[in-house]
Image (spheres, rainbow, N blue to C red):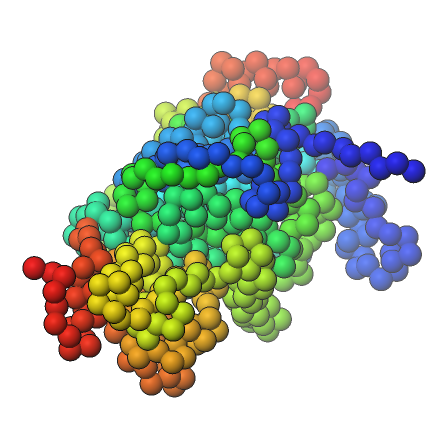
Amino acid sequence: MQKTQQIKYNRAGQKVVSPEYLLFEAPRQKQFMTGSEVVKEAVKRASVDASVSYPITPQSEAAHLIGELWAEGYVGVYFRGESEFSVMSQLAGCSMAGGRAITTTSGPGTLRAMENFPMWAGSRLPLQLVLMARGVNSPLTIQPDNLEVSFLLDTGCMIWHAETAQELFDMILAGFVVAEQPDVHVPLITVIDGFFISHTREAVMLPPDDIALPPYNPYISPIPPIDMEMPPGRFLRDPFVMKSNYTSYATHASWQFEVRAAIERSRPYIRKYLKGLVEEFGDPEGEILFIASGTAAAQAKEATQMLIHDEGIKARVLRLKTVRPFPAKEIEEAVKGVKYVFIPEFNVVGWLEREVRNVLYGKTNVPIIGSPKVAGGMTMPPEIIVEEVLRILGKEVKHVP
Amino acid sequence: MSLKIFKINEALKEFVPSEIVDLEEKATWGNPKRGIWDLPYAKELVEEHSLCAGCPESLAFRYILASLPNPEDTIIINSTGCTSLVFPHIALHTVHSLFGNQNAIASGIKRTLEWRFPDKVKDVVVLAGDGATVDIGLECTLHSFFRQERITTICFDNEVYANTGGQESGLTVKGQIFKMAPKGKQWDKVPMWQLAIDSGCHYVARLTVSSPKRVEKVIKQAIYVAREVGPTYVHLYTPCILEIGLNSDDALEEMRGRDKERFKFFEYISEKAKEVIERKKQEGLI
């Protein structure tokens, strides 16, 4: 019998294609776009059911553009909430009701919304938050800084960190695919460094916009969607965490571990759809190793080129694409044979340094240097990274006047 | 939900707990005329509850669940507090997420269900205490009214934070001594029913749960109006007998006393809501 190929369309009239085709095979055309515009292009191809928005710099434009997609019929539900706390709850409602949902926020908005993120994870909602990091008000800042990521590390959400607008585009699409796997099914926070990526233009390669991801199927979720389309048996004989009930306590406790285990189970999918949890750059023999993510990694790559070509120092970069799950094995492997590890960061606390030290504790004697660190809107020219390396190596500093 | 979905596999039936079998065989699904008169004869949607003996909230739960016109397509959102102890015992899809975000969750659920099921009626009902509705959740509550979300919000007002041990709330009356108000509450009870009217609710009612028939009528009106017009708000007095020092069998008398004063029956119906209620009465559904 001859097989007939059935072409499916989503509710926006786009042809539904496989994630593999959309991400890796579809022909792509070059565009010149900001990170905010790239969010729109990704959402447009993601068969998104719902988005809720709230203004805060620097993510506002991305949120406006998702609204335009709603007006054009590409997104099912869209409105402005009254605060980030409410927005993240409203978005949770959209996801509980079986919709694919995405929103954006920045800096202080992240902290206003904070109580929601562990609830998202505990409710196993495969939501996506695009975080355009700007730091938190300590005091008021709207400058580039990614301090808020530090607060998100233990919420039970996956955290990915894009380096470029191109990567943000691909991560948003891959993000839904990975987060919605039945054995993963946890939220994803896709981070970019605000302004550096959101407000600058770069060349990005985009597939056509008449194709899109398959719509979300809530009925393969590990938690039934709240839509009364499945039998409403009483879910529990006793409430969770209530009143001297050891079964409830045990269930709740094991659930906390299960959420973290679900993040770990995302690794094979990330290897498939992001081509790995890390990217390696520079001289494979490099004895100076930068471990970095996002824009700090981009600057470390520049510094690596300068060290190799101008100073004759073998250097390389291990760029983390994901922070949760944390690529501990990849880091352990990368530090073998290295003389120094440098961790450049755009925040005052050095959250990545802490994470790296934590996984390397007792496993290596390589000195780990948590610098340069810039915060509160400072930029990180590659020259200051080079200067830091030369200073530690006891070499003459020529680059910086 | 199709009523055909809720069928227990015959081969497994002997292993299924009897209260689940009862839900298939004796509960009132698919009948919009269901009501409090079914209570003695039909399987209730709430099993045993975990509230104090004689707690009026348990009465309110029974009356409300018996009065839902469309339980097979009704979702209930709750919040933290005494009420949240009961939800796992309810045979509907319910959500507890955070303390005070219930109207935000409900907004997302209602809008997404309208998008996913454009040809079906899905009623979304919020059911939370006074702390959740009026104190910590006031922003979410009022903004869902401003946005004209088509949801019904029911507040169980026991005038105190009961589940945490009896602290003053925004709905405690002035002068009442509670924990965190050792000299008596210094300001007035928040007139939430009035705020609901001013914020755009189309149907608002304030009452005690002393009269089951009245609760049924109010709940049905609130849900029908929310379905077609916009937000509705029901304010129920469900006193915490424990915190005001009454016995288990005193609750009804307490509510009957308040029926004559600060919880005297009050109802607001907008013009659009009147039209819906009249039509539903003619159809014999109220």
Residue at left offset 31%, top offset 71%:
A314
Q: Is residue A153 left or right of residue B58?
A: left
Report x, y in % for residue B137.
39, 44
Q: Nearer the viewer, residue A308 or B92?
A: A308
Q: Is residue A98 left or right of residue B80?
A: right
At 83% from the left and 46% from the top, the residue drawn is B7
Q: Position of residue A116 (x, y in %)?
A: 43, 51
Picture quadrant where residue B115 is located: top right
In this rendering, position of residue B22 left or right of residue B194: right
The structure residue drawn at horizontal position 57% and vertical position 29%, both measured from the top left corner, is A210
* Residue A67: percent from left, percent from top: 43, 29
Q: Considering only vertical position in the picture, is A374 above or below A68?
A: below
Image quadrant occupied by the N terminus of chain B: top right
Q: Quadrant of the C terminus of chain B?
A: top right
- From this viewpoint, which residue is outermost toward the left? A401
Is residue B211 visible to us here? no
Q: Residue at x 48, y 73 (%)?
A: A329
- Looking at this view, is B219 or A24 the one in front? A24
- Let me know if residue A146 appears in the view: yes
